Amino acid sequence: MNAFQKKLLVILVVLAVISPIGIYLPTAFNAEDAWGEWSTETVEKLVGFVPEKMKEVADLWKAPIPDYNLGDEKSSFTVQALSYILSGAIGIALCGLLLYGLSKLLVRKKE
Amino acid sequence: MHIPDGYLSPQTYIPLYAVFAGFLAVALKKIRETLSAKNIPYLGMASAFSFLIMMFNVPIPGGTTGHAVGASIVALVLGPWTAVAAVSVALIIQAFLFGDGGITAIGANCFNMAVVMPFVSIVVFKLVRGRASGGWRVYLGSFLAGYIGLVAAAIVTAVEFGIQPLIASANGRPLYAPYPIEIALPAMAIEHLVLFGVIEGLVTLLVLMYFLKNDRDSVYALKEVK
């Protein structure tokens, strides 16, 4: 890794540390979910019913850290913010490792 | 723009899985042919950047939230095929670990944000840039690459949502995503045209300027005009 790449890595870590802005701003400006990413409860409020198949499939997968939050919606901002930063760090580590592994694998195949 | 489980019917998400798999296979082949040792660290960082930038939710006051994706700048710096791999890895991690985007919708989400977006971005950049090697054409080109790239991804996503009531209804009731295209399309297009696309454009412009200053030779989109 050259000096510029190391600088970029530091910037990524900084982005993870300040990422809680991304949960603070929507609350501060009273904004709701992204369009089309509603929970089944919200869909029921919006259209009056939960589509039959949506109900069956919606909770197919139990993510280990749902919504980048180790607590829940009612947890304090501190808990949510720290979870968010941790999620960002996990993201950096996994993206880095997976792409590094993948490129090593591809380069070896070439030789 | 991360479609959750239960919003797309199998007749939508299965073909999109297949299309995405095709693009990913070509992407891996292209990466193998062109990857240099110097660029290996950039791949993981590009993926991590996309992962992180998607965490910065931006509100429309009193409305919805959205975010940039980072696929445009990855396409400009590392090329669209590398962007396919880097952004889709970020999206797959988001789906499995954080429940952001559905498991059934991984093919669709990767198609929208990791295929449509980087290719639209690179085409827009090339059109605006022409033969210029710097100056306003390069700056405007990078902003528009991000802006139009994200809007295009949003439109494709909205179409996938919007066709669900047409192709998967029973007794006049939608089985999956409930809103028809005449609602889904304007809703998603307008919010991305007005706000989120502008943010993607600015992110693309700023990061490109940073690269031009520090490692211009690596920038894929500015290699010699063929």
Image (cartoon, coloured by chain):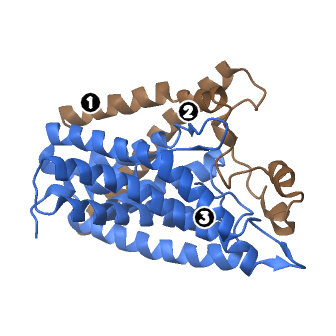
Q: What element carries label 1?
A: helix
Task: Give the letter of the blue chain.
Answer: B
Q: Quadrant of the C terminus of chain A?
A: bottom left
Query: Could you give the CA–CA distance between mark 1 and mark 3, rounded to whole angstroms?
Result: 40 Å
> Mark 3 highlights which residue?
B185
On the image, the x and y values in percent for residue B85 come to 40, 60
Q: Do the residues under discs 3 and 2 have CB atoms within 8 angstroms?
A: no
Whole-percent x, y for residue A54 in the image: 80, 64
Looking at the rendered structure, the secondary structure element under dot 2 is: helix
Separation of marks 2 and 1 at Cα, in angstroms: 23 Å
Q: Does residue A106 appear anywhere in the picture?
A: no
Query: The disc labelled 1 sits on which kind of residue?
Result: Lys
Q: CA gap, disc 3 to disc 2?
A: 25 Å
Q: Return the residue at label 1.
A: A7
The picture places residue A35, in percent across and down from the top left corner, at: 65, 52
Q: Which mark is residue B14?
A: none
* Residue A40 versus residue B207 in the image, above or below: below
Q: Which image quadrant is residue B104 in?
A: bottom right
